[in-house]
Image (cartoon, rainbow, N blue to C red):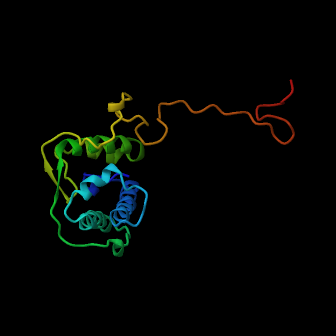
Amino acid sequence: MRLWTLHPKYLDARGLVALWREALLAQEVLAGRTRGYRAHPQLLRFRAHPDPLAAIGAFLAAVHDEAVARSYRFDASRIECRRAVRRIPETTGQLQFEREHLAAKLRLRDPARGRRLAKPPRLDPHPLFRLVAGGVREWEKRGAARGRGFFPWGAGGGRSPRAPPAPRRERPSRRGETRGGSARR
Protein backbone atom coordinates (compact mmCIF):
# COMPACT_ATOMS: atom_id res chain seq x y z
CA MET A 1 0.00 0.00 0.00
CA ARG A 2 1.34 3.43 -0.95
CA LEU A 3 -0.68 6.55 -0.14
CA TRP A 4 1.48 9.06 -1.97
CA THR A 5 2.47 12.39 -0.45
CA LEU A 6 3.09 13.55 -4.03
CA HIS A 7 0.27 15.20 -5.96
CA PRO A 8 -1.62 12.58 -8.02
CA LYS A 9 -0.82 14.50 -11.22
CA TYR A 10 2.68 13.00 -11.18
CA LEU A 11 1.40 9.40 -11.36
CA ASP A 12 1.03 7.43 -14.56
CA ALA A 13 -2.29 5.73 -15.37
CA ARG A 14 -1.30 2.52 -13.61
CA GLY A 15 -0.15 4.41 -10.53
CA LEU A 16 -3.31 6.53 -10.35
CA VAL A 17 -5.58 3.49 -10.55
CA ALA A 18 -3.49 1.71 -7.90
CA LEU A 19 -3.63 4.78 -5.65
CA TRP A 20 -7.44 4.92 -5.96
CA ARG A 21 -7.81 1.24 -5.07
CA GLU A 22 -5.33 1.42 -2.18
CA ALA A 23 -6.95 4.55 -0.76
CA LEU A 24 -10.36 2.84 -0.94
CA LEU A 25 -8.84 -0.08 0.98
CA ALA A 26 -7.42 2.40 3.51
CA GLN A 27 -10.91 3.85 3.91
CA GLU A 28 -12.23 0.36 4.72
CA VAL A 29 -9.42 -0.20 7.23
CA LEU A 30 -9.98 3.16 8.95
CA ALA A 31 -13.71 2.45 9.14
CA GLY A 32 -12.95 -0.87 10.88
CA ARG A 33 -14.52 -3.02 8.17
CA THR A 34 -11.49 -5.18 7.44
CA ARG A 35 -8.99 -7.06 9.54
CA GLY A 36 -6.10 -6.79 7.12
CA TYR A 37 -3.73 -3.81 6.90
CA ARG A 38 -4.78 -2.44 10.31
CA ALA A 39 -1.16 -1.90 11.36
CA HIS A 40 0.09 -0.66 7.98
CA PRO A 41 2.53 2.23 8.47
CA GLN A 42 1.05 4.26 5.60
CA LEU A 43 -2.10 4.67 7.74
CA LEU A 44 -0.33 6.32 10.69
CA ARG A 45 -0.77 9.82 9.25
CA PHE A 46 -4.50 9.28 8.86
CA ARG A 47 -4.99 7.68 12.27
CA ALA A 48 -3.25 10.67 13.88
CA HIS A 49 -5.76 13.04 12.27
CA PRO A 50 -8.70 14.13 14.50
CA ASP A 51 -11.12 12.73 11.89
CA PRO A 52 -9.40 9.84 10.05
CA LEU A 53 -12.36 9.01 7.80
CA ALA A 54 -12.73 12.62 6.70
CA ALA A 55 -8.96 12.77 6.06
CA ILE A 56 -8.99 9.68 3.83
CA GLY A 57 -12.13 11.08 2.17
CA ALA A 58 -10.27 14.29 1.35
CA PHE A 59 -7.36 12.21 0.06
CA LEU A 60 -9.70 10.20 -2.17
CA ALA A 61 -11.47 13.35 -3.39
CA ALA A 62 -8.19 14.78 -4.72
CA VAL A 63 -7.39 11.47 -6.44
CA HIS A 64 -10.87 11.51 -7.96
CA ASP A 65 -10.38 15.09 -9.17
CA GLU A 66 -7.18 14.05 -10.97
CA ALA A 67 -8.98 11.07 -12.51
CA VAL A 68 -11.77 13.33 -13.78
CA ALA A 69 -9.18 15.71 -15.26
CA ARG A 70 -7.81 12.73 -17.23
CA SER A 71 -11.31 11.59 -18.27
CA TYR A 72 -11.13 8.44 -16.14
CA ARG A 73 -14.35 7.18 -14.61
CA PHE A 74 -13.71 6.61 -10.91
CA ASP A 75 -16.87 6.16 -8.85
CA ALA A 76 -17.05 9.16 -6.50
CA SER A 77 -19.94 7.59 -4.60
CA ARG A 78 -17.39 5.27 -2.98
CA ILE A 79 -15.94 8.20 -1.03
CA GLU A 80 -17.77 7.95 2.28
CA CYS A 81 -16.90 11.21 3.97
CA ARG A 82 -16.56 14.44 1.99
CA ARG A 83 -15.92 17.46 4.13
CA ALA A 84 -13.19 20.00 4.64
CA VAL A 85 -10.44 18.80 6.95
CA ARG A 86 -7.32 20.19 8.53
CA ARG A 87 -4.31 19.48 6.31
CA ILE A 88 -1.83 16.88 7.52
CA PRO A 89 1.77 18.03 8.01
CA GLU A 90 4.28 16.00 6.02
CA THR A 91 8.02 16.44 5.66
CA THR A 92 9.95 17.65 2.65
CA GLY A 93 12.24 14.65 3.11
CA GLN A 94 9.29 12.27 2.75
CA LEU A 95 8.18 14.07 -0.41
CA GLN A 96 11.69 13.81 -1.87
CA PHE A 97 11.94 10.12 -0.96
CA GLU A 98 8.65 9.44 -2.71
CA ARG A 99 9.79 11.43 -5.75
CA GLU A 100 12.81 9.16 -6.09
CA HIS A 101 10.69 6.07 -5.46
CA LEU A 102 8.18 7.05 -8.15
CA ALA A 103 10.91 8.09 -10.59
CA ALA A 104 12.45 4.62 -10.29
CA LYS A 105 9.08 3.01 -11.07
CA LEU A 106 8.42 5.36 -13.98
CA ARG A 107 11.83 4.71 -15.56
CA LEU A 108 10.47 1.28 -16.40
CA ARG A 109 6.75 1.95 -16.93
CA ASP A 110 6.63 5.43 -18.48
CA PRO A 111 10.09 6.93 -19.17
CA ALA A 112 8.70 10.22 -20.56
CA ARG A 113 6.66 10.85 -17.40
CA GLY A 114 9.69 9.87 -15.33
CA ARG A 115 11.80 12.53 -17.06
CA ARG A 116 9.11 15.16 -16.42
CA LEU A 117 9.04 14.18 -12.74
CA ALA A 118 12.79 14.77 -12.51
CA LYS A 119 12.54 18.31 -13.98
CA PRO A 120 10.47 20.44 -11.59
CA PRO A 121 12.69 21.90 -8.88
CA ARG A 122 9.73 22.04 -6.51
CA LEU A 123 7.11 19.31 -6.35
CA ASP A 124 3.52 19.84 -5.33
CA PRO A 125 2.30 17.64 -2.50
CA HIS A 126 -1.09 15.96 -2.47
CA PRO A 127 -3.61 18.69 -1.51
CA LEU A 128 -4.27 17.00 1.84
CA PHE A 129 -0.66 17.49 2.95
CA ARG A 130 1.09 20.63 4.18
CA LEU A 131 4.88 20.52 3.84
CA VAL A 132 7.12 21.07 6.83
CA ALA A 133 10.90 20.76 7.08
CA GLY A 134 12.17 17.32 7.98
CA GLY A 135 13.60 14.04 6.76
CA VAL A 136 12.10 10.79 5.61
CA ARG A 137 9.52 9.47 8.04
CA GLU A 138 10.62 6.76 10.45
CA TRP A 139 7.77 4.50 9.33
CA GLU A 140 8.96 4.51 5.74
CA LYS A 141 10.39 1.20 4.56
CA ARG A 142 13.73 1.89 2.91
CA GLY A 143 16.00 -0.62 1.24
CA ALA A 144 19.14 1.35 2.10
CA ALA A 145 18.36 0.97 5.79
CA ARG A 146 18.56 -2.78 5.30
CA GLY A 147 21.85 -2.54 3.40
CA ARG A 148 20.49 -3.56 0.01
CA GLY A 149 20.60 -0.32 -1.93
CA PHE A 150 17.77 2.13 -2.45
CA PHE A 151 15.22 -0.43 -3.66
CA PRO A 152 15.98 -4.00 -2.67
CA TRP A 153 13.45 -5.36 -5.18
CA GLY A 154 14.70 -3.38 -8.19
CA ALA A 155 13.28 -0.20 -9.63
CA GLY A 156 9.87 -1.50 -10.62
CA GLY A 157 8.71 -3.52 -7.65
CA GLY A 158 9.25 -6.89 -9.29
CA ARG A 159 12.34 -8.75 -10.43
CA SER A 160 15.23 -6.36 -10.96
CA PRO A 161 15.76 -5.62 -14.67
CA ARG A 162 19.48 -6.28 -14.18
CA ALA A 163 18.98 -9.70 -12.68
CA PRO A 164 19.45 -12.62 -15.09
CA PRO A 165 16.35 -14.60 -15.90
CA ALA A 166 15.77 -17.75 -13.93
CA PRO A 167 17.11 -20.82 -15.72
CA ARG A 168 14.50 -22.84 -17.55
CA ARG A 169 14.07 -26.40 -16.45
CA GLU A 170 13.86 -28.98 -19.13
CA ARG A 171 10.65 -30.95 -18.78
CA PRO A 172 9.99 -34.17 -20.61
CA SER A 173 7.19 -34.05 -23.13
CA ARG A 174 4.54 -36.72 -23.27
CA ARG A 175 6.77 -38.78 -25.52
CA GLY A 176 9.71 -38.67 -23.11
CA GLU A 177 11.58 -35.99 -25.03
CA THR A 178 12.83 -32.71 -23.68
CA ARG A 179 12.39 -29.43 -25.51
CA GLY A 180 16.01 -29.44 -26.49
CA GLY A 181 15.95 -32.86 -28.14
CA SER A 182 15.90 -36.47 -27.12
CA ALA A 183 15.79 -37.39 -23.44
CA ARG A 184 18.02 -40.42 -24.10
CA ARG A 185 21.44 -39.99 -25.60
Residue 121, picture quadrant: top left
- Residue 44 or residue 104, whichever sits in front: 44
Of the 4 image quadrants, the one containing the C terminus is top right
Residue 136 versus residue 50: which sits nearer the camera?
50
Q: Residue furthest left?
A: 133
Total tally of numbered discs in the picture: 0
The residue drawn where x is 20% and y is 45% is: 120
Q: Position of residue 163 (x, y in %)?
A: 50, 30
From the viewer's side, name the closer residue of 128 and 122. 128
- Residue 55, horizontal then vertical, whole percent: 24, 64
Q: Is residue 118 above or below residue 60?
A: above
The quarter of the picture where residue 47 lies is: bottom left
Q: Residue at x 19, y 39 (%)?
A: 135
143 relative to 158 in the view: left or right: left
* Residue 1 horizontal side relative to residue 69, left or right: right
Going by the picture, which residue comes out furthest to the bottom? Answer: 77
Return the residue nearer the eye: 99 or 52: 52
Q: Quadrant of residue 9?
A: bottom left
Instruction: Measuring from the top left, give residue 160's x and y in whole percent.
Output: 47, 35
Residue pictured at 35% horizontal, 60% vertical? 26
Q: Is residue 132 above or below residue 147?
A: below
